[in-house]
Image (spheres, grey):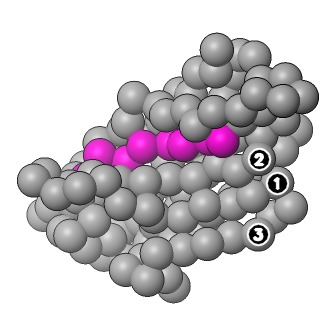
C-alpha cells in the first residue's frame, strides 16, 4: 500500500501565503505524477495543480499565477505554495499520487487532507 501524509494547513489572512506539503511512502516502485486537489464546503473536489515525473506542471485556471507546485522525486514529496490567498481558497486540500507499486500495477492514492482557512 501507499500512504500520503499532508502537512502545513491552517488559518491565513486574506492576501497571505501558505505552503502545504505531502510525503508519499510505502510500496512505491515509481510515481508517475503527484498533485493537489481541494474541496470547499458544499462543492465538488477540484484540481489545483499537478506535476509529473518529468517536471511538467498543470495548474487550474482559478489559481494560475498564484500557485507553485514543486516535487522532489528522490524524497517522494510534493509541495504547493499559494500566494495572495482569498476567502474562496478556503477548502480541504488533498494530496494525490499516481503510483506504480510494481512494474505493471498502478493506482491513484489520496491523503487525508489538510484544512486551509482564509479569513480575517
Quadrant housing the C terminus? bottom left
Characterize the local packing of mark 2: few (<14), some (14-19) or many (20 or more) Cα atoms within 10 angstroms: some
Which residue is the extreme one toward the front? 104
Q: Residue at x 29, y 46 (%)?
A: 92
Eye-nearest disc, 3 or 2: 2
Can you say which quadrant of the picture contains the N terminus? top right
Give the structural element (helix, strand or loop) at label 1. Answer: loop
In space, the residues marked 1 and 2 are separated at their CA atoms by 6 Å
Circle 3 Cα neighbour tier, 10 Å, few/some/many (<14 / 14–19 / ≥20): few
Q: Residue at 13% across / 51% down in the picture?
A: 41
Q: Which residue is mark 3?
A: 56
Residue identifier under label 1? 53
* Residue 84, horizontal then vertical, whole percent: 37, 77
Look at mark 2 in the image and give the residue it sits on.
32
Instruction: Using residue 20 as the reference point, say whether residue 11 is left or right of it.
Output: left
Residue stretch in magenta: 91-98
Tell me what residue is drawn at x 32 percent, y 71 percent. Answer: 85
Magenta span main SS: strand
Q: Quadrant of residue 26?
A: top right
| Label 3, label 2: how far apart the Cα atoms are | 11 Å
Amino acid at each position: 500500500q501507499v500512504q500520503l501524509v499532508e502537512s502545513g494547513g491552517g488559518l491565513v489572512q486574506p492576501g497571505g501565503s501558505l505552503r502545504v506539503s505531502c510525503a508519499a511512502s510505502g510500496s512505491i516502485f515509481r510515481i508517475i505524477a503527484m498533485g493537489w486537489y481541494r474541496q470547499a464546503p458544499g462543492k465538488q473536489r477540484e484540481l489545483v495543480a499537478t506535476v509529473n515525473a518529468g517536471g511538467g506542471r498543470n495548474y487550474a485556471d482559478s489559481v494560475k499565477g498564484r500557485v507553485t507546485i514543486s516535487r522532489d522525486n528522490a524524497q517522494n514529496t510534493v509541495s504547493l505554495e499559494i500566494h495572495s490567498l482569498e476567502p474562496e481558497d478556503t477548502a480541504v486540500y488533498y494530496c494525490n499520487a499516481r503510483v506504480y507499486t510494481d512494474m505493471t500495477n498502478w493506482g491513484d492514492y489520496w491523503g487525508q487532507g489538510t484544512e486551509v482557512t482564509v479569513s480575517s
